[in-house]
Structures are given as structure tokens and as C-alpha cells.
Image (cartoon, rainbow, N blue to C red):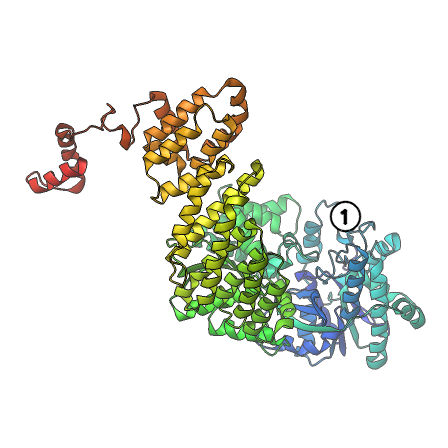
């Protein structure tokens, strides 16, 4: 980049003013503004889809806040889309704003989005995985859906080549030194573009298209648009485009040759609008190929009027203070000095991001990368979310969603946040309905999270985060209806018809109740009843029942009529009860384990269904208990299921401990194969069902397990060990330690209730008043009681007993 001082601007009659830029580059943006002020063109041509020309005036709207993006999507296939993001520091945005402020026409001259989207469709159908085309120093403005060459083509990074030629190992650092840290002085407005054009010309001579073969077609279209503007405005034409394209726009080609390159291009009908964008989506780490590493840092460089390093360190200090870290003004001063010293030592004109980052780590973060990661996330990248005026074109569904967001005070934000909803409140219930309806439409603005401090069904917790891609999902969902309610209803009905299994339909019924879709529920219920009547797979029925029963609980919280749902649930439960015992016979190990999970799920569902008051549900629990008794008594049922049935009856109070101990004793007798006995133990005390605590507090059960385990023959022990290890490894560490201690002490020395009077310290048939009295002074001290409060002391004796 030598010879900058000698470079001069374009002369009259020398052709259009070509301003080659780096997309999203603040240095390029400042240079574009200075060049336009100097040249005062009569028209500004900008790289971008020409379908967006009608949207340019919206950039002057007071409600428009970058970062924003032009969104193009196919009318008949809204999911096929492409983005052209623009930040406040994007040269294209600066050019658009300059043209609007000076009443100069602005036009987009890149290949139409109609061809771009059609190209991508052809690649998808052909099975070619495209990439966003590289442009200038990083990449073009086209989004993830933009076309590109196949993976076999070799592509070059122009910025990387120039940086390597200059002796830099980091392209970003080279760009900062030669552009971002170099101010635009008087009489020097065109020099950066002249020099950059020369550099790109040398690269194009060496590498040709550099693997960017699609760019040849785009450049042919841009040349045609430049010629048309020159015929209309003569020499008053300025072009803002990626620096990589500038040499190609200077090429002397014929109109016929350019039109020949464009002949036969595929095309689709396309709609365009403005959508909000985020700094995070401008960063490479988010997966957007045309991004930059540090949008927050670049935005700061562009907006800071002076002393950018000092202002940046002040921002960092404010962020760290907000996170309760001790950062003083002295830290800010010392960090600025260190950054300047590092820049001087490294031979840089001014401190860049690497110097400021090193200074922040050393001074403000005390060498730790943990707070530095927060600075990187919040400031270097940032969570800035743009805004688009309400007058921007949008599908009716988008307008209805925006109206609901304003009414419910749920503003889209780029930063993830949690929202606690109390469904007993009208506004919170409406917010819940909106979020559930959007999820049903595939618009994942909110994700359900576990509620803290409450397990009731009246409370919900959501994690909200608005991503720009959700605008595409909204446009895609617009085919289902013009409002969120009508679209969600139509989508639910279509999903019910297309559902593959009974469990899918019951899950959909639950979502319809959560989203409060009364018009969709009859269709879903009809299909649910038909599927339930025809489905003979007990496993499928058992999978479907829990979601169906959970749905009944929303009748109390949301005021939804679930009478029909309760009747279907009761009928489904009866079919499970009838078919479960035969289905549990003659299963292999994997099938038995899967059926055990189904038994657990049905048991939990019956617990909820038994609490409901719908007609025909009063006998559900009794019927289920009879089914469990059948399961635990059949030898043809695998041991893991028989053991679980006994455990569920014991927990439900339908089986006394003596009977449970008798059944365990029969199973663990010498006549039972060790593998079957181990499976029974797995079902009884395994699966995370609290079996460890049961063994801790029931010495007889622990003694039976211990006696059986010590009597397993050596040749069979190796076979049952993996199952037993899986069973007992699921216990909490404290439970395992307690069981080990009880086994070490031996039978008759347990600490459970059955071990009372067995000689263990602290357990006896009668109250030990001497030991109880010894505790009283400590209790009085802890509770702040006086020695004379004898009635309290007597109460404490009762407590200790």
C-alpha cells in the first residue's frame, strides 16, 4: 500500500467513480462518506439486489435503527431466502444515507435476488452444497442461502493475500493498520480507493476470478447497470461495491458479451423487505459467512468522535463494574497507557483490538480470561438489535405478531433473558399462549425452561431470544394464516392429519391446550380417537397416555374445557390396562427395559388421571392396581417388570412391607436363576426410584439382597455384575456410603426403623433421658432460651426423644 500520498482522485471524463470497499468496514465507511462529499455525484449505485430499490427511502425513517438487513424470499417458498445485512458502519449504509440526505438517487445494481434464489434452488436439487461468495476482503453481503461454487473449487481471500504480502500473519491486523487507523485528510478522499483498486487489479491478474466464478455473472450485470446510469447521468455516477469487483467494472467489454453471460438464468418470484439484524449475526462465530470478528469494536471505531481507545476502556470499565468487579479510574488510565505502549512496541500506528484486549486482560481482569470473555461477548461482539419502521413491507402474520408484542409488552431482544409467567394473571396467560402458538408454527422465539421455586402448573418459565432468522420463519408461517391464532390453528390441524403415530397426536393435543386453540382441538381429538381405536400396540398406547393426561391439568389453570379429552384418556387407559399383561410376556432384555419405562409412565399418568373428575375415571386407580398385581405374580413376565410392579404397589400403600419382603424372598431363593433375580432387583430398587433409601430404612430388604448376593455362584456372578452395578451406581453417593456401612456391620446392625433396639448408639426401645438432657444446654444456647424455662425444656426432651 505504498504511494498513497501520490495517488489522486478520478478526473472528469475518466468514467464512473468506483469506490471499492470492505463490507462492514468502518474505515471504508468513513472513506466513502468523504469521497461522496468531495465528488458530489448525481447518482449513487450500490452493490445489492435491485428489487430493494423501492425500500431505500425507508432508510431515512426515524424508526430505522441499524443493524438491519434486506430480506429476500421466494413468494411460493418463503423458507428459501437470502439476507443482505447492513450495519451503521457498513459503507453501503453510509452511501444510502448520504444519497437520501442530499436528494440524490440511489440504486442497487447487483444481480437480482430472483436469480440468486433460483440459483440456490437448482444447487439444492442437484445436491451441491454452496457457500456465500467471497467478496473484497472478506465476503459478500449475501446470506446463508446465497449461491456459491461447489466445495471442489479453490477460493482465495484477497485480504489474506495482501496481508501476507505485506508481512502480516493476521489479515484483520493488517486491515486495521492500513485503513482503520489511517484518517482521511483534506485532498486525500480518493486515495484509499485508487490504491485498493490497483491492489485488487494485481490480484485479479494473478488469480483471475479466484474461484469466484459466479462473480463473473454478477459483474456482467453490474457493468450493464453502470452503463445505463452513465447514459442517464453522464459522468456523475458513483459506484460503491466490494473492492474485488472494481477491476472487473473497469474492464472494456461489449454489451453483447455481458448479456450473453446473463442469458438463460433461472428466476423465481421474489418479495423483499427490511428486517432487524444483530451484531452477533454479523460475527463469524455465529456462522454467517460474510461476517466480521468484532462488530461491536468496529461500531465503536465508527461512532467515536475522538480518543477511541480512551472511550473504549471506559466502556469496558462500565461493563465490569456492572458485574460487581472492582475497576477504578486508575485502571482505565493504566489500561490506556499499556495499550499505547504495546502498539508502539509492535510497530502499529495506533492501538488495535489486540492491544486493547491485552491491556484489559492484564489491568482490569488481573490476567484472567473469565471476565475477558464477558468483554468479548458483550462489547467486542455485542447484542445490539436493530429496528425497522412499522411502514416496512411485511406479511400480515408479521404485522399481527408485532401488534401482539406491543400489546403484551414482549419486546424482541437479541440478548437472552428469562421471563417468569404466572398463568393466573391475564397478561401472563396471554404471553404464554402467544409463545406456545409461535412454537407450534416453528417460530422458536421462546424456549420453555424449568421453573425455579415452584412446581405448580400455574407457573411457566421461558428463555427469550430474537434471532434474525425468525423473520424468515414468520414469513414461512404466513402461508397458514394472516394472524398468529388462525395460522397456529391451521398448522395444528394439518399436523394432526399428517401425524405418524398416536403419541404424536397426543403431544399435539397437549400443545393445542397450552396454546389455547379451541377451533383446532375438535379436529385433533377426532383424529386422536380414531387413532386410539385402531392402534393395537400397547407400547404406542402407553407412550401416548402421559401427554394426554398432562393435558387434562391445563383445564384447571387455563379454564379450558377438557371433558372430551378426559373421556378419550380414560378409554385409552383402559385399553392399556387390558393389553399390558399379555404384552409383557416373553420379552428379551431390551424389550423388558423399554416396557418397564412404559409401566412407569403409565403409573405417573394414572396418578394424575385418578385426581381428575371427568366421567368414568373414578375406577382408574383401582384398575391399575389390579394390573400391577397381575404383573408381579406372573412368572412369564420379565423380572425387571415384576420387581417394578411390586415396588409401585409398595409405594402406593397397596402392599405392606411384610408382603414385599415375602415376594423378594421368593425371587431371591436358590431356585431362581441369578440373572432373573438380578433383573427383579433392578426393577424393585433401580431406575432412580428412591430404592436406595428404601434399602437404607428397611433392614429386612437389605438383608435379603445381601444374603442373595453373597450366595450367587461364582460362575453366575460375572453375568449379573453389570446389571447390579448399573442399579446401584444410580444412587446418590451418600446413599451408597450408608449402604456400604450397613453391609459392613452385618445383619441385625442396621440403623433403620426395623433396627430399633439392636444396640446401635442412639436407638433403643425406651427414651434415654440422660442422653436427652445432655443436648438441652446446646439447644438453649442455639435458641436463646433462659435456664428457667422448664416447660420449653420438657418440650425439647420430647423433641430429642
> Of 26 and 350, which appears nearest the observer?
26
Looking at the rendered image, the quarter that the N terminus falls into is bottom right
Residue shown at the point (66%, 78%) measured from the top left: 57
- Quarter of the figure with residue 140: bottom right
- Residue 114 is situated, as x and y percent measured from the top left of the image, at 77, 70
Which quadrant, please, contains the C terminus? top left
Residue 43 visible, this angle: yes
Residue 515 spot, x, y in % from top left: 50, 66
- Residue 221 shown left or right of residue 483 in the figure: right
Front-most of residues 655 and 42:
655
Residue 455: x %, y % from top left: 39, 54
Farthest residue, direction left: 788
Q: Nearer the viewer, residue 778 or 659?
A: 659
On the image, which quarter does residue 586 sit in? top right
Q: Which residue is mark 1?
A: 166
* Other residues around mark 1 within 10 Å, as few (<14) / some (14–19) / many (≥20): few
Find residue 70 and report its horizontal and vertical position in percent. 68, 69
Query: In the figure, is residue 78 to the left or right of 540?
Result: right
In this rendering, is residue 151 above or below 783?
A: below
Residue at 39 percent across and 64 percent down: it is 556
Q: Say which residue appears at 43% left-offset and 52% top-offset.
A: 606
Amino acid at each position: 500500500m505504498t504511494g498513497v500520498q501520490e495517488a489522486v482522485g478520478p478526473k472528469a471524463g475518466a468514467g464512473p467513480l468506483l469506490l471499492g470497499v470492505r463490507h462492514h468496514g468502518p474505515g471504508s465507511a468513513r472513506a466513502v462518506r468523504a469521497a461522496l462529499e468531495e465528488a458530489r455525484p448525481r447518482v449513487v449505485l450500490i452493490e445489492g439486489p435491485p428489487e430493494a430499490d423501492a425500500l431505500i427511502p425507508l432508510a431515512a425513517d426515524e424508526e430505522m435503527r441499524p443493524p438491519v438487513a434486506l430480506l429476500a424470499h421466494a413468494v411460493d417458498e418463503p423458507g428459501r431466502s437470502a439476507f443482505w445485512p447492513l450495519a451503521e458502519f457498513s459503507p453501503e449504509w453510509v452511501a444510502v444515507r448520504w444519497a437520501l440526505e442530499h436528494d440524490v438517487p440511489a440504486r442497487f445494481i447487483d444481480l437480482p435476488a430472483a436469480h440468486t434464489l433460483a440459483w440456490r434452488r437448482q444447487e439444492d436439487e442437484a445436491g451441491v452444497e454452496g457457500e456465500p461468495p467471497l467478496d473484497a476482503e472478506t465476503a459478500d453481503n449475501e446470506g446463508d442461502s446465497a449461491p456459491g461454487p461447489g466445495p471442489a473449487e479453490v477460493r482465495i481471500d484477497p485480504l489474506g493475500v495482501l496481508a501476507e504480502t505485506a508481512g502480516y500473519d493476521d489479515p484483520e491486523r493488517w486491515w486495521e493498520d492500513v485503513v482503520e487507523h489511517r484518517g482521511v485528510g483534506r485532498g486525500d478522499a480518493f486515495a484509499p480507493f485508487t490504491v485498493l483498486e490497483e491492489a485488487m487489479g494485481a490480484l485479479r491478474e494473478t488469480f483471475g476470478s479466484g474461484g469466484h466464478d459466479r462473480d463473473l455473472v454478477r459483474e456482467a450485470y453490474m457493468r450493464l447497470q453502470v452503463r445505463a446510469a452513465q447514459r442517464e447521468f453522464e459522468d456523475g455516477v458513483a459506484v460503491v461495491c466490494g473492492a474485488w469487483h472494481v477491476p472487473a467494472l473497469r474492464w472494456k467489454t461489449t454489451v453483447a458479451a455481458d448479456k450473453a453471460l446473463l442469458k438463460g438464468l433461472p428466476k423465481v418470484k421474489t418479495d423483499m423487505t427490511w428486517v432487524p439484524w444483530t451484531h452477533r449475526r454479523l460475527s463469524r462465530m455465529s456462522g454467517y459467512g460474510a461476517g466480521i470478528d468484532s462488530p461491536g469494536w468496529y461500531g465503536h471505531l465508527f461512532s467515536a468522535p475522538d480518543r477511541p481507545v480512551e472511550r473504549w476502556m471506559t466502556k469496558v470499565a462500565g461493563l465490569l463494574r456492572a458485574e460487581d468487579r472492582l475497576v477504578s479510574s486508575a485502571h482505565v488510565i493504566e489500561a490506556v497507557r499499556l495499550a499505547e505502549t504495546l502498539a508502539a512496541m509492535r510497530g502499529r500506528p495506533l492501538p488495535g483490538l489486540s492491544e486493547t484486549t491485552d491491556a484489559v486482560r492484564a489491568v482490569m481482569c488481573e490476567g484472567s480470561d473469565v471476565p475477558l470473555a464477558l468483554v468479548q461477548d458483550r462489547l467486542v461482539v455485542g447484542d445490539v438489535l436493530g429496528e425497522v419502521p412499522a411502514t416496512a413491507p411485511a406479511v400480515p402474520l408479521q404485522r399481527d405478531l408485532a401488534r401482539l408484542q406491543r400489546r403484551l409488552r414482549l419486546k424482541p431482544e437479541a440478548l437472552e433473558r428469562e421471563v417468569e409467567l404466572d398463568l393466573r394473571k391475564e397478561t401472563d396467560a396471554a404471553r404464554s399462549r402467544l409463545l406456545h402458538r409461535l412454537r407450534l408454527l416453528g417460530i422458536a422465539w421462546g424456549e420453555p425452561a424449568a421453573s425455579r421455586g415452584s412446581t405448580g402448573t400455574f407457573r411457566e418459565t421461558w428463555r427469550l431470544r430474537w434471532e434474525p432468522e425468525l423473520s424468515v420463519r414468520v414469513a414461512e408461517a404466513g402461508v397458514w394464516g394472516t394472524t398468529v391464532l388462525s395460522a397456529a390453528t391451521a398448522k395444528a390441524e394439518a399436523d394432526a392429519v399428517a401425524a405418524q403415530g398416536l403419541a404424536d397426536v397426543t403431544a399435539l393435543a397437549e400443545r393445542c391446550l397450552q396454546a389455547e386453540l379451541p377451533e383446532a382441538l375438535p379436529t385433533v381429538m377426532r383424529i386422536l380417537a380414531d387413532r386410539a381405536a385402531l392402534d393395537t400396540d400397547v407400547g404406542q398406547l402407553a407412550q401416548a397416555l402421559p401427554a394426554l393426561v398432562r393435558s387434562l391439568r391445563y383445564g384447571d389453570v387455563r379454564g379450558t374445557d377438557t371433558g372430551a379429552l378426559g373421556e378419550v384418556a380414560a378409554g385409552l387407559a383402559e385399553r392399556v390396562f387390558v393389553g399390558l399383561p399379555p404384552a409383557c410376556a416373553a420379552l428379551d432384555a431390551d424389550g423388558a427395559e423399554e416396557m418397564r419405562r412404559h409401566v412407569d409412565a403409565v403409573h405417573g399418568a394414572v396418578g394424575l388421571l385418578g385426581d381428575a373428575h371427568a366421567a368414568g375415571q373414578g375406577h382408574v386407580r383401582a384398575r391399575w392396581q389390579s394390573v400391577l398385581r397381575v404383573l408381579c405374580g406372573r412368572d412369564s413376565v420379565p423380572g425387571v417388570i415384576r420387581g417394578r410392579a411390586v415396588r409401585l404397589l409398595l409405594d402406593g400403600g397397596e402392599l405392606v412391607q411384610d408382603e414385599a419382603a415375602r415376594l423378594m424372598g421368593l425371587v431371591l431363593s436358590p431356585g431362581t436363576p441369578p440373572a432373573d433375580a438380578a433383573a427383579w432387583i433392578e426393577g424393585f430398587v433401580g431406575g432412580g426410584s428412591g430404592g436406595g433409601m428404601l434399602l437404607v430404612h428397611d433392614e429386612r430388604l437389605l438383608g435379603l439382597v445381601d444374603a442373595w448376593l453373597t450366595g450367587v455362584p461364582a460362575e453366575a456372578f460375572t453375568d449379573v455384575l453389570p446389571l447390579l452395578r448399573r442399579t446401584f451406581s444410580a444412587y446418590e453417593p451418600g446413599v451408597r456410603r450408608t449402604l456400604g456401612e450397613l453391609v459392613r456391620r452385618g445383619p441385625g446392625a442396621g440403623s433403620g426403623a426395623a433396627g430399633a433396639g439392636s444396640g446401635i448408639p442412639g436407638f433403643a426401645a425406651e427414651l434415654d433421658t440422660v442422653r436427652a438432657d445432655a443436648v438441652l444446654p446446646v439447644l438453649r444456647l442455639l435458641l436463646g432460651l433462659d435456664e428457667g424455662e422448664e416447660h420449653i425444656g420438657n418440650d425439647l426432651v420430647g423433641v430429642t426423644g
